[in-house]
């Protein structure tokens, strides 16, 4: 085998290793109180790598309220390769006990969930998975590492769509995994290099720059979202408001224990549940832009049934409580009075 006489600096090929990516990976590991950070070309690239840790016949239990793309990669891609998936509402940990089988190898949760903002008790779920040697993955995208650190609560793997709050400016698509487990990290690094879904160095630079303001942005996202949720709550034309910062949200007390703030995402329905009315509201916004994604400095509004969650069959969406009339807001860091004025004008 040929070996150069010149000493290698460890950066022979940028798919395998790159100094800007190394800096970001170390940074993200530190933010999540983890030992290893590994970045991918997108959040779904990170999900893909985690699913590749398993083999045909292995069973994965995932929370039924989750990002539509996560459902799609599980059911439309990995199910074809023999992995088995069960979707269960995990905001009640007893449902997990009932769903476990001898083949269960991984439990996948989002908390807060996308788009219904349900809160899953990470510690309670971890107690169950740890007792059985099952891997617990927490998608921490909606909270960000500033508000929640799942590894500290017993999770084995944390996954992020860096595209969202971590990047913070809607100009980068990226994913990340953080873990304390050396064996899992070396298998994931192998997959990262072997399968190639790596982010480019410029995107890693953008994510690192976004992280410098993560704490300031998250504080403002939380303040603005609380005001928006309270405004929607008292509006006569608004029906249900989903926001863990509202005292009657079923996960409110748990959020206070598990997170350091209530986050920047708010979902709501209009009184009467009319789809044409909901569409009219979304099309009337001037400050909230209609678009897929979340977690950027600018406010966005999304229609989950036709956009982010369209790949989940309607019957499954509805069984899980996701109505066609649900409107999801990613509350940005603008002047909150402008946001309230925009909501008032659009809802009428
Ligand atoms: O878009 P990407 O970086 O591949 O991340 C996928 C992903 C993973 N996990 C959660 C909780 C997510 O919300 C997402 C992406 N979500 C959207 C694009 C959205 O608007 O909900």
Image: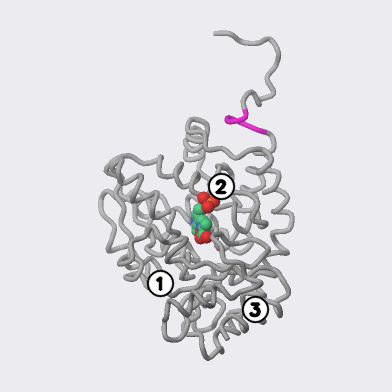
At mark 2, the secondary structure is strand
Helix, strand or loop at disc 3? Answer: helix
Residue 89 picture location, percent across and down: 36, 67
Picture coordinates of residue 126 (x, y %)? 43, 59
Please tell me whether residue 15 belongs to the stretch shown in magenta.
Answer: yes
Residue sitting nearer the eye, 152 or 88: 88
Distance between the alpha carbons at the discs numbered 1 and 3: 22 Å
Earlier residue among tags 1 and 3: 1
| Rendered residue at 62%/29% (across/down) | 14
Task: Write the start and end of the magenta stretch as one range.
Answer: 14-18
- Specify whether 120 is left or right of 133: right
Quadrant of the rendering where the N terminus is positioned: top right
Q: Up-down: is 28 above or below 275?
A: above
Q: Main secondary structure of the magenta part?
A: loop
- In this rendering, the answer to whether 200 lies above or below 233 is above
Q: Which mark is residue 324?
A: 1
Q: Residue at x 48, y 48 (%)?
A: 44
Q: Nearer the viewer, mark 2 or mark 3?
A: 3
> Label 3: which residue?
342
Q: Nearer the viewer, mark 1 or mark 2?
A: 1
Name the residue tied to disc 2: 176
Badge 1 or badge 2: first in the primary sequence: 2
Local packing at callout 1 (Cα closer than 10 Å; few below 14, some 14-19, many 20+) is some
């Amino acid at each position: 085998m040929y070996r150069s006489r010149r000493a290698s600096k460890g950066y022979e090929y940028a798919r395998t290793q790159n100094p800007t990516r190394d800096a970001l990976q170390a940074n993200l590991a530190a933010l999540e109180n983890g030992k290893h950070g590994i970045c991918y070309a997108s959040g779904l690239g990170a999900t893909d790598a985690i699913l590749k840790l398993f083999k045909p016949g292995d069973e994965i239990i995932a929370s039924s309220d989750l990002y539509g793309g996560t459902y799609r990669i599980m059911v439309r891609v990995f199910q074809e390769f023999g992995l088995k998936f069960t979707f269960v509402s995990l905001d009640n940990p007893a449902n997990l006990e009932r769903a476990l089988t001898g083949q269960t190898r991984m439990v996948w949760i989002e908390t807060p969930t996308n788009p219904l903002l349900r809160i899953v008790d990470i510690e309670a779920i971890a107690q169950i998975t740890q007792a059985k040697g099952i891997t617990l993955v927490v998608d921490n995208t909606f909270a960000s590492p500033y508000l929640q650190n799942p590894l500290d609560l017993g999770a084995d793997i944390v996954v992020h769509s860096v595209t969202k709050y971590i990047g913070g400016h809607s100009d980068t698509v990226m994913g990340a995994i953080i873990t304390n487990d050396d064996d899992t990290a070396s298998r994931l690094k192998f997959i990262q290099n072997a399968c190639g879904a790596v982010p480019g160095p410029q995107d890693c630079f953008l994510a690192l720059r976004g992280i410098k303001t993560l704490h300031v942005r998250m504080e403002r996202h939380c303040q603005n979202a609380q005001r928006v949720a309270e405004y929607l709550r008292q509006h006569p034309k608004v029906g249900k408001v989903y926001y863990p910062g509202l005292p009657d949200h079923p996960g409110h007390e748990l959020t206070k224990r598990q997170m350091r703030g209530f986050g920047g995402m708010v979902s709501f329905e209009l009184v009467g549940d009319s789809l044409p009315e909901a569409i009219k509201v979304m099309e009337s916004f001037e400050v909230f832009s209609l678009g897929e994604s979340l977690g950027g400095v600018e406010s966005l509004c999304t229609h989950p049934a036709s956009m982010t969650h369209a790949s989940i069959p309607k019957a499954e969406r509805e069984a899980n409580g996701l109505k066609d009339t649900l409107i999801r807001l990613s509350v940005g860091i603008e002047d909150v009075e402008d946001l309230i004025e925009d909501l008032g004008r659009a809802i009428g």
